[in-house]
Amino acid sequence: MFVIDCPNCGARDQSEFTYAGEAHIARPTDSENMTDAEWAEFVFMRTNTKGLFAERWWHATGCRKFFNMLRNTATDEIHAVYRIGEKPPKVTADLPATPAGEASIGSGNDAVKIMTRDEEAAS
Amino acid sequence: MSQPYRIPGRGLINRDRSVSFTFDGREIPGYEGDTIASALLANGEIMVGRSFKYHRPRGIVGAGGDDPAAMVQIGSDPASTDPNVMVTTREIHAGLEARSQNCWPSLKHDVGVLNDVFMRFFPAGFYYKTFMGSDRFRWLNWMTFEPFIRRAAGLGKSPTKPDPDSYESVNRHCDVLVIGAGPAGLAAAANAARSGARVILVEETDRLGGSLNATDPDGTTIGGKAPADWIADQTAKLAEHPEVTVLTQTTAFGYYAMNFVGLIERVKDHLPEHRRDRRQPRQRVWRVRAKQVVLATGAIERPLVFNENDRPGIMLAGAVRTFLNRYGVLAGKRVLIFTNNDSAWQTAFDIRAAGGEVAGIVDLRRELNEAMALRALKAGIAVYPRTAIVGTHGRHRIDSAFVSSLDDNGNVRGSRSRIECDLIAVSGGWNPNVALFAQSRGKLKWDEELASFRPGLSWQQERSAGACNGTLELQEVLAEGSKAGLEAARAADFTVRAIRQPEVRTDAVETLNLVPVWQVPSGLPREKTKAFVDLQDDVKASDLQLATEEGYDSVEHTKRYTTQGMGTDQGKISNVNAFGIMAEARGITVPEVGTTTFRQPYRPVTIGALGGQHVGAHFMPRRGTPMHAWHLEQKAIFEPVGDWLRARAYPKPGESFHDAVQREAKAARTTAGILDATTLGKIDIRGKDARTFLNRVYTNAWSKLAPGRCRYGLMLGEDGMVSDDGVTACIADDHFHMTTTTGGAASVLQKLEDYLQTEWPDLDVWLTTVTEQWAVAAVCGPKAEEIVASVVEGIDLDPEEFPFMTWQDGTVGGIPVRVFRVSFTGETSYEINIPATYGRWLWEELIAAGKPHGLTPYGTEAMHLLRAEKGFIIVGQETDGTVTPGDLRMDWAVAKKKGDFIGKRSLSRSDTVRDDRKQLVGLLTVDGDHVPMEGAQIIGTPEEPAPPVPMLGHVTSAYFSPNLGRSIAMAMVKRGGQRMGETVWIARLGDKPVPAKIVHYDFLGDAVGEAA
Ligand SMILES: [Zn+2]
């Protein structure tokens, strides 16, 4: 269960929010001139990112406003919250090495992680 | 005197208060402060149950939450009996009934012990090999065997009646959550508390102090005070701070994202009946969101894995010490110590100090600490260095051990000699309890000195202190705890200064000098060695080795194949040993093998506690309309629709549900019917661009809808599929009243807000949900006008003056109402909207006015039937997210000429314009008395052909129509629109298909006549 920092209301429990899918997908304004494939790209295709992902949330039982969030889907770390219409801010995140790889820490996928010798030396 | 194993003057139990309980029907005396385990041991009872697979005798091994197998069933009431309770964690009280589990007919004479005789036929992966992959058993399968296996080898028995107890869950925020109230946790909490931070300190047992309660009270001082006095001091200091909450009997069972920690508090389990406050729940779940967490969860001792190491009477050395110093029980009359490290020697010294007899210290190491050896010599304790226990003897309790000395390579050398003993205190080292740390997704690191994992890199806002961090010396433990408390408070934005640490003086052994030995040699071949790793699941070292030879490399796979660590204890004492044995078998290091997941919950949590208050009528919130109480008084049958409870039918006394629905639906068309339509979603839409907005969200055109008029609209997803429908009224040019389906109200509002806020922020449109503001009574039927006219003022209700699909303002007894001339039945209909508080009053006015006219209240079932007679769709019944307006043959509702709307482009996709799509049609069964089953498949032949059967579609709605005197059905059928008059067949399970004719779905039109 996350705590999400709504840009209007502040930090609230995740149960107040509704997930609303990938962000920054603008609805085409000239769909009449699009091919089926181009239109399908908008309707059906999402990036399903493992790693830093811009997504939309709706503060359903709060201010009822949509907003954007940058979340590392591998670790559930929330890096930024920003308003609709704004560009995603630049953030640095510990990202999975490859689409199939793992974040070095924080991922719940790979059970328990053990420090590497390099990490031990560095710490 | 009873309790022959009790040591006078020792322990923190209250000897002034005797408490007795029953174990397998026998009365067992003990004292207040005893656990079931300590009281049993005080009376010489060490065997508690039998193991899962081989039914081998199982005794008490640990002294707390680490014990692997000593579980009992509490109570015999079929509603409240509690299975799999660890004897080491449950305090005794008067009236407590405990029973041994997993043995039949009795603890000492068990039938399942035959499994033990056939042990070599139950190798690793036995269940998989036999039931999943074997050709020999292909004719049988797991489903056949499972009930028998479960009956023979079940653990405790679940209650069979509803739980009579209440539970609750509460939410708390705190600055610093300290988990574990041993020396590190107490020091952390006390230091954090000084800052004024809101602190929660959690202790699993009934007493603060942790490992200090298990030390010889005469051997250690903290700041010049005996451990018990230091604990009392700290407790008193914590009580001075109003922001501090101390919870005993409480286990932190799960560490989740963003410092969300679940606690389970056992509020009443440990109390006798007369002290259980009826106002309190049995157990309470605390859902804590902490800014900072201090983990002070201690260390868990691991045993040594040696031949015949599972007999009752073989106990962890630390547990022997805990029973002695905390509970005043020395569990054996002649104790043999077996170890690979220094810590177990302290157990020997404590036993001697308490006047007990030590049979010797068998130590696997060659190099021994000289001072320690000298101390043993002075205490008269025999020491056997470089020696192993290679076997044990004794059926329900050990009576002797066989030892052999080891050569330089660690192999058994020379002959076995026998040492008489009734208790073996074993230590294979200490594993920092990193379960919660691992759940927080921190990274572990391998500690060579401990030969175990300890916290490495933190991921969340937590820090570990004390033994759970691998720190064992008390002075260091206190320092680490204090530092963790200060840092946590500061990280939570509090200011606090460090104070001087109390000085620790102790003669306790605090060194480890551990030499890891993952499996003690027995001098016997592998198949003859019974060296158990997991005592609950009966996993032997040889099972792990066999699994490795069969190619199991992944630690998670090996776990599942052998069932290592899969019991209720999750392998707390056994997992690291198992990883060590796997590492040796594969010739790699333990960190290379890795570790299995430390899953939530850390200890089993009652489902009731997780459910909390959300049981029975409180399972989920239910909404009722202002007329709900009236429906209840009429003894209506209800159904849940979305969050709402709606009246489904109003059966009269003695009338069946079916007959009631038929009567109600008949009345609505012959006299008059009244429906509580309050639950329809209602959205108030305002702003100068409201019309433009409606044009974009509905499929049809809204530009010309004049104030005072209403229009039906279909709403699509961008994929072109119908997602909702409803009637919207124009109140003014910049003001509309939209209705949605009952179940779709919330999702439609979300969708509309989504488009407004994110796609069309330039539109001046404002949405407000007004579902709850209006109560709605819908009156329909031939007598509707007359009835409504006698109640509503200020409107000429004549359908000529007040035509279909318009609305007007009026009043009822001076209260303003909005009346909509819309209809979901096909009859002349008036939907009267009144401010919600007047809902029941209006309803009763209408009922009274309608009485002379035969006005009949009808429920949602008759509503469904009536709309089906007219051929109106229900979104979610006729549609399933794959249905376009064209599929519904409702192209009339789609404005092709207007601009873009949601889903428009998808209506010309290659898939949506296919001419062989399923389309909505009516179905009339040849036998008019037969009502098909909703969801039934439609086929094209009178007999069902061999599979795969070509499917033409399915029935979406089916009713017996009282107004038509026959059955009607709606169905989605391939090319349905082009098949009018054709016959299809409705498949039935285990019966012949039923013929039916395809017709137009407006059954009140000419469909029925045409078909006849
Ligand atoms: Zn908000």
Image: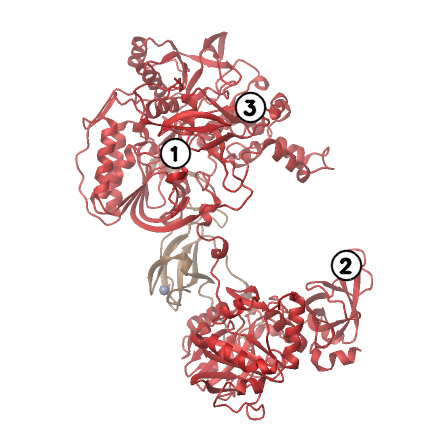
Q: Is residue B688 left or right of residue B721?
A: left
At 71% from the left and 66% from the top, the residue drawn is B953
Is the residue marked by circle 3 packed among few (<14), some (14-19), or many (20+) residues within 10 Å? many
Q: Nearer the viewer, residue B762 or B722?
A: B722
N-terminal of the two: label 1 or label 3? 3
Q: Which mark is residue B56?
A: 3
User: What's the distance in space between the residues labelled 1 and 3, CA to CA?
Assistant: 28 Å
The residue that mark 1 highlights is B433
Is the residue marked by circle 1 packed among few (<14), some (14-19), or many (20+) residues within 10 Å? many
Kind of element beneath mark 3 = loop
Q: Which chain is brown?
A: A
Q: Does the rendering let one see residue B14? A: no
Specify the farthest residue to the bottom: B801
How far across and down, in percent of the image, does residue B843 sit?
A: 51, 77
- Asked if the residue at label 3 sits under 8 Å from ligand 1, the reply is no
Q: Is the residue under label 3 in contact with that under label 1 (CB below 8 Å)?
A: no
Kind of element beneath mark 1 = loop
Circle 2: residue type: Val
How far across and down, in percent of the image, does residue B398 sit?
A: 49, 16
Q: Which chain is red?
A: B
Circle 3: residue type: Arg
Q: Quadrant of the C terminus of chain B?
A: bottom right
Q: Quadrant of residue B222?
A: top left
- Asked if the residue at label 2 sits under 8 Å from ligand 1, the reply is no
The residue that mark 2 highlights is B949
How far across and down, in percent of the image, does residue B994 sit?
A: 79, 65
User: What's the distance in space between the residues labelled 3 and 2, CA to CA?
Assistant: 55 Å
Q: Nearer the viewer, residue B174 or B55?
A: B55
